[in-house]
Amino acid sequence: MSFLSYETSQNMLELLHVNSARYEKVPLSCSLGRVLCEDIVAAFHDPQFPTASMDGYALIYEDMDAPTITIIGENPAGSDEKRTLSRGECIKTFTGSIMPHGADTLIQIENVTVEDGKIIIKEKVAFGSSVRPVGEGYRARDVLIEKGTKIGFAQIGVMAALNHVMVKVSPRPRVAVIATGSEILDLGQNSTNPSQIRSSNNYTLAALFESAGADVLQLGTVGDNKEAIAKSFENALASADILVSTGGVSVGDYDFVKDIIPRLGAEILFKGVTIKPGKHIILAQKEGKFIVSLPGFAYSSTVTAILYVLPLIAKMLGKESAYKIVAAKLQEDFTKRSKLTEFTACNVSVEDGEYFVDFAGKKVGSSAILTNLLGESALMISGEDDSDLLKGTFVNVILLEDF
């Protein structure tokens, strides 16, 4: 079998065409976690008029040295203030109110004493104090939120301020997840012999894909039977954009998945990549839909799903990237175990804006140790040409957050 390099496989993945032009409109209140498929552009300045940022008295700065200034009224928030101040006058103005015409400064309530309808200034303020200028927040025609952004609480708040009742978002890709293997028991099934293992892959991957913005079809487990696997794959492709399977991709007598995919009329784009874990990964395409078949070990299937399924989901959502890669400094020596591109579970921390990596509590062993991804974990990348790495070396790390 001819294996691709990790870099070549990622380039091929990047060049794949997916239909990301589709969109749907959802109410703003239902848009959390969705991905925008249009830029959000300001229709006006914020604020549109000079606005008070505190409670106080709006006045003309040149009156700051006057012995007293006459209060000519109040200006509550939300009122349509029309008065124009003259020298020697002030208006009591509240947070969020439009500044009266002619006023250029607001002096806080605690800086004055009020006597007989006039204020006496106890402590002066600077010109323009406590006044929000026009466009302080943003200017008309500013792009406030870019297309491809995952909507969070701040995005919802900004769009609410712009009166976006409905939001144009990318449809969630539908991802079907199937675990193959006669030794696999689904949740709730009774074990009949000690060699059987409990299924975790399909639940791990379903949660991963949902966190990345996909709708997941959880199709459970299927045993090592060619016809049963083929039927499950065929049904999955009828209703999903991406089919993800685990197990059956290696070279064993019961690894049927690699033979079934071509029977479904799918084109295998690549089969085998020089990575650890997961070198027997398969990526195939059929009529705009994709099949990604992953190894069966839990850590291996999770890592390869991050590397090869999340980018497909991101492309379908119109996102620029599936995950964040940062440079981090090793806090201990690292022993490389193979000549492949390795993805090693590590702990990541941030100090003064700099990322650091260590391996405390991470077990060295097979590709089955999913517990290595608990805690503040990340994936450290070491390339084919890398050898053992010394403490203090900078390495690339995939952050396992904010998919």
Image (cartoon, helix red, strand yellow):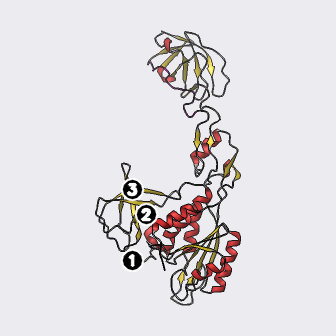
In this rendering, the label closer to the viewer, 2 or 3: 3
- Residue at 48% x, 9% y is 66
Amino acid at circle 1: Gly
Give the residue at mark 3: 327
Q: Of helix, strand and loop, which one carries label 1?
A: loop
Rendered image quadrant of residue 248 = bottom right
- Residue at 55% x, 34% y is 137
Of residues 43 and 136, which is closer to you in this image?
43
Residue 270 vs 80, above or below: the answer is below
Q: Earlier in the sequence, mark 2 or mark 1?
A: 1
Give the residue at mark 2: 377
Amino acid at circle 3: Ala
- Residue at 58% x, 33% y is 139
Q: Measure the alpha-carbon separation of dots 2 and 1.
A: 17 Å
Crowding near the residue tagged with mark 3, few <14, some 14–19, many ≥20 C-alpha atoms within 10 Å: some
Amino acid at circle 2: Ser
Of residues 204 and 238, which is closer to you in this image?
238
| Residue 388 place in picture, x, y as percent | 30, 68
What residue span does the magenta drawing correspond to? Answer: 124-139
Q: Of helix, strand and loop, which one carries label 3?
A: strand
| Residue 71 place in picture, x, y as percent | 58, 14
In this rendering, the label closer to the viewer, 3 or 1: 3
Of residues 182 and 104, which is closer to you in this image?
182
Q: Is residue 312 magenta?
A: no
Q: Measure the alpha-carbon separation of dots 3 and 1.
A: 25 Å
Q: Earlier in the sequence, mark 3 or mark 1?
A: 3
Give the residue at mark 1: 365
Rendered image quadrant of residue 171 = bottom right
Which SS type dominates the magenta stretch?
loop
- Residue at 48% x, 14% y is 64
